[in-house]
Image: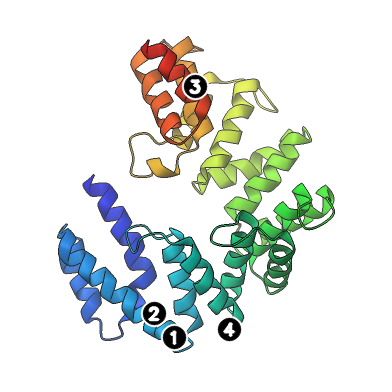
Amino acid sequence: MKKIITLILLLSFSVFSFADESGEINQKFFEHCFQSDELRCKIIVQQIIENSEKACQAHNAEQCFRLGMAYSGAVYAAVSKNEKKAYQYYKKACDKGHTKACTALSKVYMTGQGVKVDYQKAKQLAEKACNDGDDLACSNLGFLYKDGKGVSQDTQKAKELYQKSCHQNKKNAVACNNLGVLYLKEKNYQAARPLLEFSCNQNYLKACYSLATMYADGLGVKQNTKKTVQLLNKACPSDSPYLAFAEPEACFYLGLIYHNGVGIKKDATKAQTFFQIACDLEYTDACHIRNNSEK
């Protein structure tokens, strides 16, 4: 638990440490938050938020953007999640010309978090931010073209946007994964594998799961149960503070592997553990199997 709290606080600090130029609040943050003084820590975090809100009101677009991140839940323990406030702060920052805020706002319109889904607005914002050089915006735009949301479906256009996003500046793990998954569906395993390997190595867990399916089914690689389990374990980090980011499908299939003894020794305890994790992450098939096993 202490490791999780420390990770959460570190994420909070990384976003809001700039809020007090004197450094006094930052020093207090370390004194109280990293000593697990939760009450005083909460007070300090609130001070940081208040300073950031004042800066945002004074037309500081960067502060508005970071507040949007906090209220969206991208920064844990900083503030209570509030999707409507996240939308409002992203919009303020985007209206002031903050490219990354416009990218975040495009995602908000795509998912309907705090605002009604509007794929047309999502497309407009992602397109502008992509043209302004934000690689994540290009990835968002690629997703819209892939699924034909707000635009005519165009897989080739999606692929081009994912390629642009993946190879722009430092590689974007999300875009590289999305491109890899497209190649995987096209059965172009030679092109898919290095992209998924890169994204998995960058700890994008969806890519680790996709790569595991390649080794499980022998898709462009030699079938390898040991490698499959290794990758599934990385995609479902059951014993680490990153459990909340686990890929539920990976946890579910790990449960099945241990339940059925596929290539490894059966282990009912481990199977139940992974079914429980997947169920907690709202993977309903895992909940059904877990419940039936308990009867």
User: Where, quadrant-wise, is the N terminus in this rendering?
Assistant: top left
Q: CA distance from mark 2 to mark 1?
A: 6 Å
Location of residue 21 in the rendering, given as x and y in whole percent from the top left corner:
31, 85
Location of residue 272 in the rendering, given as x and y in whole percent from the top left corner:
38, 20
The residue at the point 81 percent across, 57 percent down is: 151
Q: Which residue is mark 3?
A: 226
Callout 3 amino acid: Lys
- In the image: residue 286, left or right of residue 31: right
Residue extending furthest toward the bottom: 58
Colour setup of the view: rainbow
Callout 2 amino acid: Glu
The residue at the point 83 percent across, 50 percent down is: 153
Occupied quadrant, residue 245? top left
Q: Is residue 256 visible?
A: yes
- Verify CB contact (< 8 Å) between mark 2 and mark 1: yes
Crowd rating for badge 3 (residues with CA inside 10 Å; few <14, some 14–19, many 20+):
some
Residue 96: mark in rendering? 4
- Verify CB contact (< 8 Å) between mark 2 and mark 4: no
- Verify CB contact (< 8 Å) between mark 3 and mark 2: no
Q: Is residue 37 above or below residue 174?
A: below
Q: Which residue is mark 2?
A: 53
